[in-house]
Image: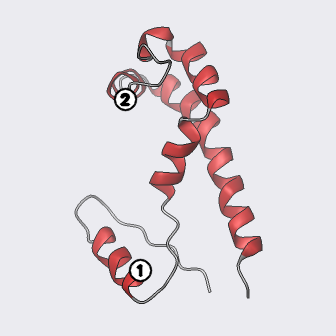
Amino acid sequence: MIVGLTGGIASGKSTVSNLFRKYGIEIVDADKVAKEVSEKKESIEKISNIFGKDILDSDGKIVREKLREKAFGNRELLKKLNEIIHPQVIEIFVKKKKETPQ
């Protein structure tokens, strides 16, 4: 069985997730998956081409605060960021679902 856990900020998602973990239920956190996707070399290249190299630190990693400032200040840029990240996150979830015994 697959269960989706959603809710707003401070709605108890982490509390429920921790309870699930306590009982041995596997948790796949979309926020963590999205962060991992955004840290991939391919994603960093695409994102920095859109948002500018000034969102990168000296090691070539994304400075999330700089990206956040640009993305959430411009709907079109946020849409482009989502077009990079969301398909990869969905792909990971689809793969995980296929691997999950029914």
User: Alpha-carbon neighbours of circle 2 within 10 Å: few (<14), some, or many (≥20)?
Assistant: few
| Callout 2–callout 1 Cβ contact below 8 Å | no
Q: Residue at x 67, y 46 (%)?
A: 88
Q: Amino acid at mark 1?
A: Arg
Residue drawn at x 65%, y 62% is: 93
User: How many angstroms separate mark 2 from mark 1 (CA)?
Assistant: 30 Å
Disc sitting over residue 77 in the figure: none
Around disc 1, counting alpha carbons within 10 Å, would you say few (fewer than 14), some (14 to 19), or many (20 or more)?
A: few
Residue 19 falls left or right of residue 99 = left
Instruction: Report the mark closest to the observer, 2 or 1.
Output: 1
Q: Nearer the viewer, residue 3 or 29?
A: 29
Would you identify the image quadrant in which residue 19 lies?
bottom left
Q: Which residue is mark 1?
A: 21
Secondary element at image label 2: helix
Question: Residue at image x 64%, y 22%?
Answer: 46
**Residue at screen point 45% across, 53% down:** 31
Instruction: Give the percent coordinates (x, y) of residue 22.
Output: 37, 85
* Among numbered discs 2 and 1, the one appearing first in the sequence: 1
- Residue identified by numbered label 2: 68
Give the secondary structure at mark 1. helix
Rendered-image quadrant of the N terminus: bottom right
- Total marks shown come to 2
Choose between 7 and 20: the one closer to the eye.
20
Instruction: Give the side of residue 40 with respect to residue 57, left or right.
Output: right
Q: Is residue 96 above or below residue 73?
A: below
Q: Quadrant of the C terminus?
A: bottom right
Q: Where in the figure is residue 5, as x and y percent of width and height?
A: 44, 72
**Residue occupying the far front of the picture:** 59
Q: Is residue 70 left or right of residue 8?
A: right
Q: Position of residue 47 (x, y in %)?
A: 57, 23
